[in-house]
Every structure is written in structure tokens, then in C-alpha cells.
Amino acid sequence: MAEERRTRSTEAFYGRRHGKTLRPRQGAALDAFLAATLIDLEKPSPAEISELFSVAVTSVRLEIGFGGGEHLLTQVERYPETGFIGVEPFVNGMAKLAAAAEEGETGRPSNLRVYDDDATEVLDWLPEGCVEGIDLLYPDPWPKKRHWKRRFVSQVNLDRFARVLKPGGLFRFASDIDTYVNWTLMHCRVHPAFEWVAQSALDWRTPYEGWPGTRYEAKAIREGRPPAYLTFRRL
């Protein structure tokens, strides 16, 4: 079963991997989905990242921690000429994406590949300068100050982003937690490979084009936590 799968992690991994136990039908559907879309990191990374996909793609984007897959699947369907790699270690989130993808108008998308463990493994496996964009949307904020070191945005992970992003590629970060927004701005400001592209407050208060919204985001807004949508360019 998919819930029993484990792989190595390059560093300490923090966060849940399991929620409610999947029903047999859900587990079988998830196994079938992963059999068709899971990236095998035991194989060498391809010289051309487009070779990961069974259809021709003109560019590739990566989403880290896609939750239930609302944003990822919207992008996959909206941009069929773009290849998407989604990473989500939480089994129930991957199961939601699998179910939604199978129920879509075109069935399982050919321009989608996934990985169900530590995103740093994928970042270290990918060829240099191969992706046009990286999305990190509503990551675990680790709100307690003693846990801030667990946040995914860090100098070492920004180094990883810089390695795999093409020049001019975009790193997008969204959060409703002001300390994490400030944390990300601070880390990107001092990293030589990134520049914040905002020209006014409207730029970071406005959702990204085609943004579908998520249940988590709606809850944050109801509770008075306005989201911030940051975009950084790879220099």
C-alpha cells in the first residue's frame, strides 16, 4: 500500500505523513496513481527534464507541498504545454490529488509527475537550471519561535532553488503568517540569487493569476489573517 512506502530523506523531515487511514478503494486508487506518475529517484535524472513526461512540454514547474492539490491541478489543466512536478509527503493530500486527477475531464494528466517524500531529494536530483518556476504555497509555518529552524525557506534550500531554477525563473511563496512572510523576505533579500519583484503593496496583496483559492486560505481570511503572495526572480 502507498501508506507503507518510505524513502530516505536528505535531512531531518518535520511534519505529518499520515492523517485518517485511507479506505481500501482510496488506497488502491492512490497506488495506481503513483504507479503512473511517481518519479523514481533511484534512476539518474534525465539530461532534459522534459523527458520525464509522456507528452511534449515546453517548460517545467515545481510545486512543493501541494496539500490537497487544488492549485497544482488547476495549473496542470490550464497549461497543458507545461510539465508539472508536485511534491507532497502527506499521504492524504496525495490521495486527494489522485482522486481529483482521475475525476477530471481528461482523466489522469500526462503533464504531471509527483513525488511523495522529502522535497529536498527532488531538488538535489533535478538537473541544474531545468525549471521555470517553484511554488511554495502555504507551507507549514512552524509558528513557535523555537521551531523556526524547521521552516522550509532557509539559506540551504534557497541555494537548492537557485541551482535548479533557470535565470529569470520565479520562486513564488504564499502565506497568511506574517512572521513567515517576513522570514522569507529576509532570507531572499540576503541571498544573491534572488530579487523581490514587487513594485507596490498591491503586488503582494493580489493573488497570483489563475489562483483558485484553497480551503485553508478561506479559513485564514475569515479569521483575519490576510495572505501575502510573494514573487522572487532568479537572477
Image (cartoon, rainbow, N blue to C red):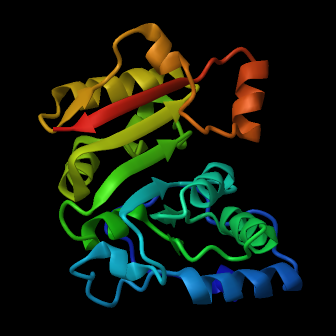
Nearest to the observer: residue 180 or residue 142: 180
Residue 109 percent across, percent down from the top left: 62, 73
Left or right relative to 73: residue 6 = left
Residue 179 percent across, percent down from the top left: 46, 21
Residue at the image position 42 percent from the left and 28 percent from the top: 230
Residue 166 percent across, percent down from the top left: 22, 53
The furthest residue to the left? 192
Residue at the image position 12 percent from the left and 34 percent from the top: 192
Vertical comparison of 187 with 86: above or below? above
Nearest to the observer: residue 79 or residue 172: 79
Vertical comparison of 173 with 74: above or below? above
Residue at the image position 44 percent from the left and 60 percent from the top: 13
Nearest to the observer: residue 193 or residue 79: 79
Q: Quadrant of residue 222?
A: top right
From the image, which quarter does the C terminus lie in?
Answer: top left
Residue at the image position 33 percent from the left and 24 percent from the top: 185
